[in-house]
Image (cartoon, grey):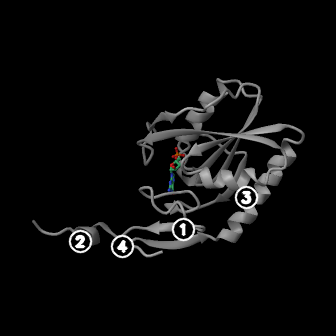
């Protein structure tokens, strides 16, 4: 993909490997919740592509809903605040819920979501995360299903963005930004 901003993309996980792994996670969910209806809750926006591929491979009765949150200070602070931007459309009481996340990083978002969703009394609550960066964890949370464990790199593609761009990449890529001095050189002098 051409980059007018001197950003560089290095492929980390190819589309074929993603597809294979998403199918495997779907099979595992199908086996674990055999005979039940599964209610998938996608965390917007990053999980939308993962969820749409995952749900089509689950061999059970399904329903879907979405929730959106934003996290402040998650970069390096344990005090990151999570705020709800969009709540679920319907109740999850009595349902077998699988929360579908794009990436588990510090764990602040997931620990907030687990806390509020547990209060709503689902019959069961599981977590499927496409990616996991365990080295960055601040909160002690784990996903029941993990697509790939990755190193501490900033990744984009397959739903994950940088400033809303790159969500449409079919591969998951490491985004390399130009060093600050290169950026400074490109800012015209007054
Ligand atoms: P956490 O609360 O676990 O620190 O952060 C989870 C959220 O941070 C993710 O849902 C995602 O939106 C964002 N995030 C964390 N790491 C990355 C990354 O490498 N790439 C992108 N695009 N977003 C990330």
Label 2: element kind: loop
Horizontal side, residue 187 vs residue 46: left or right:
left
Foreground residue, 137 or 9? 9
Which residue is disc 2 drawn over? 186
Horizontal side, residue 175 vs residue 62: left or right:
left
Label 1: element kind: strand
Q: Nearer the viewer, mark 4 or mark 3?
A: 4
133 w.r.t. 144: above or below:
below
* Residue appearing at x 50%, y 39% in the figure: 69
159 w.r.t. 82: above or below:
below
Q: Nearer the viewer, mark 4 or mark 1?
A: 4
Residue 140 position within the rendered picture, expressed as x and y whole percent measured from the top left: 60, 40
The answer to whether marks 2 and 4 mark residues whose Cβ atoms lie closer than 8 Å is no
Asked if residue 139 can be seen in this view, the reply is no
The numbered mark at residue 173 is: 1
State the image quarter where residue 57 is shown: bottom right
Q: Earlier in the sequence, mark 3 or mark 1?
A: 3
Asked if residue 92 can be seen in this view, the reply is yes
Q: CA distance from mark 3 to mark 1?
A: 17 Å
Q: Badge 2, how many Cα within 10 Å: few under 14, some, many 20+?
A: few
Q: CA distance from mark 2 to mark 3?
A: 41 Å
Q: Badge 4, how many Cα within 10 Å: few under 14, some, many 20+?
A: few
Q: Earlier in the sequence, mark 1 or mark 2?
A: 1
* Residue appearing at x 27%, y 68% in the figure: 183
Residue 34 position within the rendered picture, expressed as x and y whole percent measured from the top left: 88, 42
* Residue appearing at x 56%, y 57% in the figure: 159
99 w.r.t. 161: above or below:
above
Which residue is disc 3 drawn over? 22
The answer to whether marks 2 and 3 mark residues whose Cβ atoms lie closer than 8 Å is no
Which residue is disc 4 drawn over? 4
Q: CA distance from mark 4 to mark 1?
A: 17 Å
Q: Earlier in the sequence, mark 2 or mark 3?
A: 3
């Amino acid at each position: 993909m051409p980059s007018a901003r001197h950003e560089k993309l290095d492929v980390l996980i190819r589309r074929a490997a993603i597809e294979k792994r998403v199918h495997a996670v779907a099979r595992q969910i199908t086996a674990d919740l055999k005979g039940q209806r599964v209610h998938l809750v996608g965390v917007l926006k990053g999980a939308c592509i993962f969820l749409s591929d995952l749900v089509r491979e689950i061999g059970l009765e399904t329903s879907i809903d979405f929730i959106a949150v934003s996290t402040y200070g998650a970069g390096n602070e344990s005090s990151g605040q999570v705020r709800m931007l969009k709540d679920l459309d319907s109740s999850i009481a009595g349902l077998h819920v699988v929360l579908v996340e794009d990436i588990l990083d510090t764990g602040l978002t997931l620990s907030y979501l687990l806390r509020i969703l547990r209060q709503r009394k689902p019959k069961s609550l599981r977590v499927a995360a496409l990616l996991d960066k365990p080295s960055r964890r601040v909160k002690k949370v784990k996903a029941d299903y993990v697509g790939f464990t990755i190193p501490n790199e900033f990744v984009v593609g397959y739903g994950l963005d940088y400033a809303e761009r790159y969500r449409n990449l079919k591969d998951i890529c490491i985004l390399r930004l130009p060093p600050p001095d290169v950026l400074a050189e490109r800012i015209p002098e007054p």
